Amino acid sequence: MAAQRRVAALTRHLEGDGEGRTPVVSGALCRASSADPEVAAVLYKFITRDNMELRQKIFDFLKDPIYQPEHYLSIADFRALTRERFARFAAAHFFTITDYVDNPRRFLAALECLAWADYSLAILSGVHYTLCGGTITKLGSAAQVAAHVPAMDVGRLRGCFGMTELGHGSDVAGIRTRASYDAATREFVLTTPDDDASKYWIGGAAGTAHICAVFAQLEVAGREEGVHVFLVPLRDEAGRPHPGVRTADCGAKMGLNGVDN
């Protein structure tokens, strides 16, 4: 049924609804776009929809030669290029992570533009801004937002998102990473009880991220409190792992090799 609803929606966009209403965008318009600049402009406006000024600024920014395709790089070089591309985009500060809550259309418009340049860049940025930054913005306190988001906005502090585990993928209820509250030190101690509980396929964790939004089962005074999110420092400013943190690289993938999982 879900697939049929999607097909019906696409049909209405392309052919109209059978009640005299014109289609949103016609097949003839699509076919003519490559030959007619005016038609191409209509399609561009339809695809970009909103935040046109912001999108145009980002598209102009992405004309920098560093964002041109590079098809013959090694994985190490591709990742280094993706990190540099991200650093330059973040430093331009086109939007803020708090837009995730305050102005989500602007937030999504900015990230959507990156897919026009390179999808590894888009994914790495999405993990940083949306999964990690968005989690802090939505679930964190005002003090936590103030402490992390300004530096994340401009790429000085890089984040990742630690939900998926080796033994059971993204089954949040089944997460086995443990977080125990130590009343004496007033700290949460996170542990990985076995290999199956290892956080796995975490984009940015292998060598880029400084912090991680880690999902774990919380235990307080012997009582299970369910899954909570903890902001865990992974590396210092020089990129050195903090004591007690162990990371490894998942290696080559079938795609998105600019992302260090």
Image (tube, helix red, strand yellow):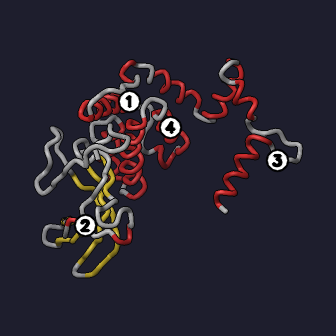
Q: Are marks 4 and 3 in contact (CB under 8 Å)?
A: no
Alpha carbon separation for disc pair 1 and 3 = 41 Å
Relative to the observer, which residue lies in front, 28 or 96?
28
Amino acid type, residue under disc 4 in the picture: Glu
Alpha carbon separation for disc pair 2 and 1 = 36 Å
Q: Are marks 2 and 1 in contact (CB under 8 Å)?
A: no
Q: Are marks 2 and 3 in contact (CB under 8 Å)?
A: no
Alpha carbon separation for disc pair 4 and 1 = 13 Å
Q: Residue at x 67, y 63 (%)?
A: 1
Q: Residues within 10 Å of mark 3 (few under 14, many from 20)?
A: some
Q: Going from the N terminus, do you reach mark 2 or mark 4 first?
A: 4
Furthest residue in direction right, as rendered: 20
Label 3, on which residue? 17
Label 1, on which residue? 89
Amino acid type, residue under disc 1 in the picture: Phe
Q: Residues within 10 Å of mark 4 (few under 14, many from 20)?
A: some
Relative to the observer, which residue lies in front, 13 or 189?
13
- State which mark lies toward you, 4 or 3: 3
The image shows residue 84, relative to residue 16, as above or below, that is above
Residue 112: numbered disc: 4
Q: Going from the N terminus, do you reach mark 4 or mark 1 first?
A: 1
Q: Residue 106: percent from the left, percent from the top?
A: 53, 39
Relative to the observer, which residue lies in front, 188 or 176?
176
Amino acid type, residue under disc 3 in the picture: Asp
SS type, badge 4: helix
